[in-house]
Amino acid sequence: MPLLYDTEPLAKRVENVEEDSFKQHAIQNAQDSIGAKRNQIAESDPLWDEKCNQAAIIRDHVLDNLDYYIKEFVTNAESHGAQIHFAPKGEDAINEILDIIKETGETSVIKSKSMMSEEIGVDSSLEEHGIKVTETDCAENILQTCKQPPSHIVVPALHLDRSHIRDVYRDTYGYKGSDDPQEITHFLRHLLRPVFLSGHVGITGCNFGIAQTGTCTLVTNEGNARMVSGLPETLIVVLGIDRLLPDLDALDIMNSLLVGSAVGAKMTSSLTLNTGKRHEGEADGPVHMHIVMVNNGRSKMLGGTYQKMLRCIRCGACMNICPVYRQITGHGYGSIYPGPMGIVLTPQLQGYKETGELPYACSLCGGCASVCPMKIPINSLILSERYDMVQEGDASGLDNFLYKTAGKILGNTKKYNSVTKKAARIMQKKGKDGRLESDTAWVPVLKGWTQTRDLRNVQKVKFRDQFAAYEAQKGTQQASGAQVPTAAPTTSRGQTPSASKEAVAGKHAKVAASNDTSNAATHNANANVRNGANTNAKDGE
């Protein structure tokens, strides 16, 4: 399945999601649960913010010197017997993987969860070439069996209910049990055990590549990735070129932030470090290890506005707080990278022409940036994408027309006055109690607002008109020698925006008089003391 799996318009995708209430509630419950656990972990760790700052510095350092760290990683991985394959594009990676499998003579592979393999469409591509792929991660196997894309990068089968999963396994594999998750999991374990033991080619992703040692790391909760990487004779690791760390000390920081942000835990169930192929005397590990390093558009982001997005460690924290993701779920984005991180990453990898609507699926609330352990200013990057789209001419024709028209109106006083006066008259007729309501949502310009909220009417008499009338009256009265009123004009709601000059002057006069009285009393009292006069208690009150 490639990076974009649904190319229907955003509005259509959202409409489809809205018809599935279970999916929406599942996402909302997961956000509340995982988000609360993540916050608890962050609040209980006094060094959390310091680690986040350190992590951002480490990731920036690697990205600024990526050529150096790629070379170091390759050198050390090869010294341990791994073979390195460079893939500029996704299709290049697929071709490398196909060639490796062809050399083994195998027609099936076992695979663990990998976002990089999802991005380049490994499963669908291999199956097109007659190679059977078995996903061994529980959620990924469910999605593969249901033939559905992921809805989250950490818990990808979040949107499916247990009854549907039971029915699919019943129809596909003859499952006869109930919809109890534990019973389904036991059945899946029984189903996968012989596949693990008979598999000769394994494919995994890589959370982090350690340049100092040439190590590929896997962070999982099920341990299936350890079996995929340890049992088959041939192991293929698919690694994005941006996912490198300098050393194991950096891994320690990253791993704690990844696990805490992803699932709200202090540590993961299984952390696997694979360094090269199996050596003499070792009980497990691959006889042949291949690392396919995939670029697929990442180098274009280096040195530019969006390089910060390459810090991302795929924890999913930004999704767990996003109000838009909460409503449209992962499938509303049409990309295997949903949520705020996907809004930035998908257009950068795919281009704006196919993903131009994504940057607008965001409220710019900044919640994503507040929980990102890598300190990525995601909302600012999304805003930059909107700007870039306009600058590069990738905005929609309607948007270009509306903004050009608005610019002409706002930049011309006569046109502005004319349009706002007409708008005021129309809104007064269409509005109810001074507001436009949902029955005006059919108007294209108003639809995005009034279909979900009310819009206050433009007032009949504008402040600038009132002020102009006041200035005209002032000039006439000055010419005739009459006293000019100093009270400020009222607004169209009948409110006085500021106090009159007379009121202010009167207030100052009272204060001055009070000060004079107080000063006189003090002077008299001092004089009495100097003269030796006695004062009684009452005089002192």
Image (spheres, rainbow, N blue to C red):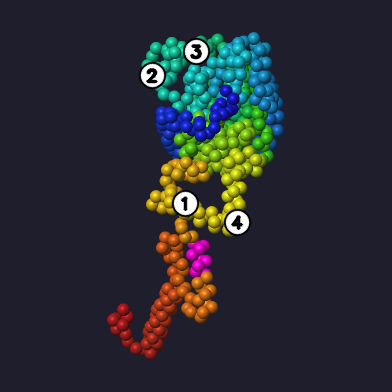
Report the residue at 49% width, 21% height from top: 143
**Closer to the camera in the image, 328 or 368:** 328
Where does the image place residue 231, in percent across and percent down from the top left?
57, 14
Circle 3 residue: 193
**Closer to the camera in the image, 437 or 64:** 437
**Identity, as a three-letter code, of the amino acid under mark 2:** Asp
Element assignment for label 3: helix
Report the residue at 49% width, 43% height from top: 443
Element assignment for label 4: loop
Q: Earlier in the sequence, mark 3 or mark 2?
A: 2
Q: CA distance from mark 1 to mark 2?
A: 58 Å
Which portion, as a residue range, is magenta? 463-471
**Marker disc for residue 412:** 4
**Closer to the camera in the image, 400 or 205:** 400
Mark 3 Cα shell of 10 Å, populated few (<14), some (14-19), many (≥20): few
Q: CA distance from mark 1 to mark 3?
A: 71 Å
Q: Is residue 479 left or right of residue 176?
A: right
Disc 1 + disc 3, Cβ < 8 Å: no
Circle 1 residue: 426
**Identity, as a three-letter code, of the amino acid under mark 3:** Arg
Q: How many marks?
A: 4
Q: Quadrant of residue 186 in the image?
A: top left
Where does the image place residue 495, in percent across and percent down from the top left?
41, 63
Disc 4 + disc 1, Cβ < 8 Å: no
The answer to whether residue 264 shows anywhere in this view is no
Circle 2 residue: 179
